[in-house]
Amino acid sequence: MLKQPIPESAPIVKKRISDPLPVQIVLIGLTLLFFIGFIFLPLGLVFAQAFSKGWEYYLESIREPYALEAVKLTLTTVAIVVPLNAFFGVTAAWAITKFNFKGKATLKTLLDLPFAVSPVIAGLIFVLLVGSRTPFGSWLGEQGIKIIFSTPGIVIATLFVTFPFVARELIPLMEAQGRDEEEAALTLGARGWQIFGKITLPNIRWGLLYGMILCSARSIGEFGAVSVVSGHIRGQTNTIPLHVEILYSEYNFAASFAVASILVFLALLTVGVKVTLEKQFQKNSFHH
Amino acid sequence: MGIELQNITKKFTGYTALDNISLNVASGELVALLGPSGCGKTTLLRIIAGLELPDSGKIILEQKDTTNLPPRKKNVGFVFQHYALFRRLTVFENVAFGLKVLPMRERPSRSAIQERVEHLLKLVQMDWAIKRYPSQLSGGQRQRVALARALAVNPKVLLLDEPFSALDAKVRQELRRWLRKLHDEIHVTSIFVTHDQEEALELADRIVVINKGRIEQQGTPQEVYDHPVNAFVYNFLGNVNVFHGRIKNGKVTLGTHHVDAPDELKHTEERASQAFVRPHEIGISRIRSAETDLAGTIQEVRIMGGQIGLNLACEGFEHPIDAEIPRELYLNLQLAKGEKVFVSLNRVRIFTGDYEI
């Protein structure tokens, strides 16, 4: 038998563990196809339709008073809903993560209720609660307060639908961070508001902002719940999505898509802010 | 008196964390609360700090009843097991925190705060890290900053909750010697909680051994180590061999071996008892030097650094006996696995009672 010479040092074969090429191609291809079919194509169509009657018509459609009112109402709603839900979300997350009390688990589950309930049902709940035919609603009406078919109703419905975003973003974060820092601040003589302002809030600020962005995105686009409580009064209780729907059902496709393109811009804006914040978040997570 | 605890009781659902604890700590003393995890020692510390409220009992700090005061009015420095530094604040801001949250009229001036923080950081040898963030420091460094932060408010009492348990062995030892030195310099009344008997023995002026929410024994490290009042304390303060035997006519029977019972147990009626021997108090020799020596065989040899651990099968004993001997003796006697030796049980401790390990 011949003795094979053994090489002094065997060459190190570096083999990367990865899927075979065909699998990679198929997976990447499928993802691309999905993006094209469900995101780029519809987006393109929105703009194609919006500009189908030319620039002038596009500008006219989005500058028309009803459209402007719709934009104004949507932005007003967002401006009211997001801060309120940020406040409620922080409160709920704080209560759930920093204290022990009976029914905590139930409360945590209930937080998800707005996600589980269909938005249309959510809208109907408020109609049944404060509509003009209910005792409470008619009493409010006598005081001159109108909720259903007016801005307060839209705000309340949106509040309900978008409630979980901030709390759900914060609860895991605050659970991971624990109570140690707050307790340390407490023993160092800080008062409640000082602890919140100097310790808790800085620790959760990125999570909070992220939750607020998700909350704004949903507030801008909410259709179902708002549709039920709004009454579709043009120039008064129409938000952007409702206005788009009205124009569409009137066969005014070009105008409908033109207004829809505003929604697209707002969505792109939120995504942009989100991406920027995520980068910041990663940079800052160094200090976690 | 620095700290006076009177009849502190605390119950959580299902169990009693602290059962009528009374304890005095003199001003300037460094006391260790030693006990297994879940014995209530951390709860006691948190109650002193005001982070938990006792169900009953009184906490008196420097002659002042602080039982119902909120933590911020207690003037207590607290050092947490996992440091609990403010992650978004620099080392400077961390240490300055307690001064900056003071009400306007009590708050020192900016320059006074700066000076005090620098002084404290120098004291804990962390002045070089004043601009760093906690995440840029090692565990030992973080704990020193945490200590400076706790000292910044001039606490009457310093409480340390397992301050070294999250550190690795080498740093732990270094830091506890350093803490002892620091305490000798600043003399602030301190209580620290630990489950590490070595730490308690080395660091404390006085040790309070706690088990199941009750104080088992308190005394200087020497007293507690040399004169443990019961089997739990003896067992908790170091490694042990346990023999189950019976006391009869002033003698304790362990296997085929007899030991004199301690004086206080000389005249008791026959009853079950437990005998304890520390591994390092077991004598090993090649020749039988006394009638009571046991014949044994080395089953296992463990190298433990300066000490050598032997696992011995002894005639008349059901379970093997652990012994620790100096490395030098081990080499001189030319011991090895399988060798026959004579074993003498020095300083056997006898306890009766139903204590279970």
Image (tube, rainbow, N blue to C red):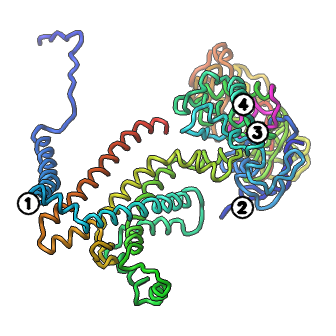
Quarter placement of the N terminus of chain B: top right
Number of residues whose C-alpha sits closer than 10 Å to that of mark 1, classed few (under 14), some (14–19) or many (20 or more): few
The kind of residue tagged 1 is Lys
Q: What is the magenta range? A: B185-204
Marks 3 and 4 belong to one chain: yes
The kind of residue tagged 4 is Leu
Instruction: Give me the residue at 10% from left, 60% from top.
Output: A49
Residue beneath label 4, please? B294
For label 2, the SS is strand
Asked if disc 2 and disc 4 are in contact, CB closer than 8 Å, the reply is no
Please report, as a chain letter, where disc 1 is located.
A
Residue beneath label 2, please? B11
Q: Distance between the residues labelled 3 and 4?
A: 50 Å
Left or right of B239 on screen, residue A251: left
Q: Distance between the residues labelled 2 and 4?
A: 49 Å
Q: Where is residue A85 in the image (x, y as percent from the top left)?
A: 45, 62
Snapshot quadrant of residue A247: bottom left
Snapshot quadrant of residue B260: top right
Foreground mark, 3 or 1, reads 1
Snapshot quadrant of residue B183: top right
Instruction: Give me the residue at 43% from left, 50% from top.
Output: A209
Foreground mark, 1 or 4, reads 1
Residue beneath label 1, please? A53
Number of residues whose C-alpha sits closer than 10 Å to that of mark 3, classed few (under 14), some (14–19) or many (20 or more): many
Number of residues whose C-alpha sits closer than 10 Å to that of mark 2, classed few (under 14), some (14–19) or many (20 or more): some
> Tag 3 or tag 2, which sits nearer the N-term?
2
Q: How far apart are marks 2 and 3 (CA)?
A: 25 Å
Residue beneath label 3, please? B158
Q: How far apart are marks 2 and 1 (CA)?
A: 77 Å
Residue B234 appears in the rendering: no
Left or right of A12 on screen, residue B349: right
